[in-house]
Image (spheres, rainbow, N blue to C red):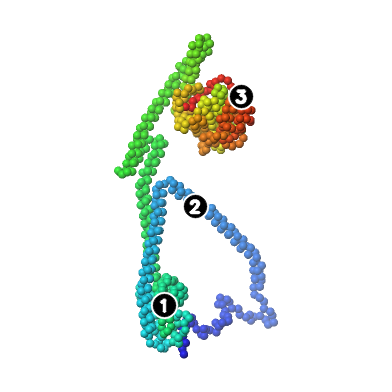
Amino acid sequence: MVSAIKQVPEPQGPNPSHAPADSAPGALRPDPATPVKTADTSRKPGTHPVPEHTDAFGASLARLPSQVRIWRRRALIVAVRVGRLVRTGMDRFFPGIRYLLYSVQRRWRRSLQFRTVLTTLLLSISSFAIVGAYLSNQIANNLFQERLTQAESETRYNVKQVQDTFDGAQVTDQSSVITLVYDTLNAVEGRGSVIQRRYVFEAMPEQTKPRNRWVESRASDQLTVSVIPPELRAAVQDSGKEQFWASTEFPVGTEDRPGIAVGNKVTFNGTVYELYLIYDLNTAQQTLDEIQNVLWAGGAALILMIGGIAWYVTRNVVSPVSHAAVVSEKLAAGQLQERMVVKGEDEVARLGASFNHMAASLQEQITQLATLSQMQQRFVSDVSHELRTPLTTVRMAAEVLFDARHEFDPINKRSAELLYNQVERFQSLLADLLEISRFDAGVAMLDAEATDIVQLVSHVMEGAAPVAEEYGSGMTLNAPEGSVVVEMDARRIDRILRNLVLNALEHGEGRPVNISVASNETAVAVTVRDHGIGMSPAEAARVFDRFWRADPARARTTGGSGLGLSIATEDTKLHNGWLQAWGNTGVGSNFRLTLPLKKGGTITKSPLQLEPADVGLPGHGDRTVLVLGSTAAGVADAGKAGAGGEANGGGEADTTAEAEEAQVAGGARVPGGTHVPGGTGASKAAGTGERS
């Protein structure tokens, strides 16, 4: 009997039986690159052979350690140099990346056109990526479903033909069976059709082998059953006549191609076989790749076109706006003749025309106001200068009458006193008007010198002591120990502080006045805090206006011209400083003067807060406290109003204890403070005490 025949692969390569004798296993063949040494026939009999190159070999062995050290050192040097290069590159790379990100961020903040174009590009790329992925997936699915439907249809037809051929075959010998199977399967392979089919023909395992089973397996193009997914084989083996499919990959030459494997069962001569038809999807994959390439290329071109369109549109819209911004900056700088260039009749052109009309109107009004202001300034200056000579004469006469008032009757005596006081006030008003005219004319000069501002504040408080005694108000100074040297015009700062202190005493209603001094790296600040009638935020915003009053009907005792705070503001501007006010009706007010430590310096942050805290000054180290007043009652009132001291944070001791301890005749003292005797009489310090 003939047993099942398996195809035996033909031997590859030359026949081993025809190999030369020297190529037999174990045979050694000389290396053609190695020189063959011949026997030395010149050696005399009885002598021992002498090894060749013995001395050279020993010398090379002796030099080997030194060469190893040299090469190790060279390798170390190269490694160190490479490490330095890498570190240098990284040190330059990361700052470059940070600079690039900073540039993009800065450009994003400052350029509307850049922000619009970049946003449009990002949104376009995101939209195209989503749409492209969806289209690619749909096209791939449609192509696959089309190929799968065609593969299933063709497989049913071809399997039916194979089964019909096997059922109608009448062969009994081995060669006829093999020929029939091979011819049938080759016909099924279907070369030249749209979808290239390959087959795997495999007998199902665990079958009783009939005696006429001469075909065990067969596959096209040297495929094996390993290309069939195990799940598909299991499904085919466990089924009846159903058809199953699965995606797979199979080798074709040197590449792996995607395919669809469709499996069925066929029987031949009592043996059940698995027949798998494999359909090549390489053509569909190439079609899908071409479609994706077209999508990518079209998307890139579309994104570039969208970016160009966005740039063009935003440029047409943003350019006039940028031009308007430049013209606005020039107008703000005083170049009132600047105008926008108007082209066309669209909305942007109408905007430019309106802008130019507004600029022309502003120029006309500003010119009129400037002319009027110059006339007013010239009038004030001329009148002030013209009044000085007759005022001097009137003052001399008033002084003569005032000195001789004791010889007059009561009515004339009172008239002489009123005349003298009003002439003094008129002279103060005239001095303020002259000072304002200097500021308006731009001829005020800053005579800055290094001065201790704490000493200057103490001097101002000493000069205001008689006024404090008259009102019954105590004055406390919260300042750092030592000196705070500032480059400033001492005369002007003295005038500012005197105005603030006299204002605080006049409006403090007999309550204490707290003065604080603090400094940081770039600035020094002085605050003057009272607990009197206070003022509303709206009044605080206008308190520095000329001749402005919160209550014009209120009687004044230390009142001057109403220009004191306006002059103080101009003096502060000369120092490049800040003069600010805070107030709350019924609680009091706080004025803060902030100056740069150096002449021409800038202020970034004031050392003291404008809105005062409830208790004291925030911790600034050790401080000296100076209390000015005529009686201890004034200090007791300070304790009641300040509840522990007053400034912008805590720093003083309990004022109740201070009041008990300050029973000093003619003055007051607190721990760590300096005693200042109380003065008598009203203060006639130069300057004004006007707040409103």
Upstream in the sequence, badge 2 or badge 3?
Answer: 2
The answer to whether the residue labelled 2 contacts the one labelled 1, judged by CB atoms less than 8 Å apart, is no
Q: Which mark is residue 253?
A: none
Label 2 amino acid?
A: Ile
Q: What is the spatial separation of the Cα atoms under label 2 and label 1, in whole angstroms?
A: 66 Å
| Residue 220 in view here | no
Q: What is the spatial separation of the Cα atoms under label 2 and label 3, in whole angstroms?
A: 69 Å
Report the front residue among 219 and 100. 219
Tell me the element at label 1.
loop
Point out residue 560 in the picture as x, y percentages from the top left corner: 48, 23
Upstream in the sequence, badge 2 or badge 1?
Answer: 2
Label 3 amino acid?
A: Gly
The answer to whether the residue labelled 1 contacts the one labelled 3, judged by CB atoms less than 8 Å apart, is no
Label 3 packing within 10 angstroms: few (<14), some (14-19), many (20+): many
Q: What is the spatial separation of the Cα atoms under label 1 and label 3, in whole angstroms?
A: 121 Å
Which residue in the protein does label 1 denote?
A: 240
Label 1 amino acid?
A: Gly
Tell me the element at label 3.
loop
Which residue in the protein does label 2 denote?
A: 97
Point out residue 640 in the picture as x, y percentages from the top left corner: 57, 30
The answer to whether the residue labelled 2 contacts the one labelled 3, judged by CB atoms less than 8 Å apart, is no
**Residue at figure coordinates x 39%, y 63% from the top left:** 137
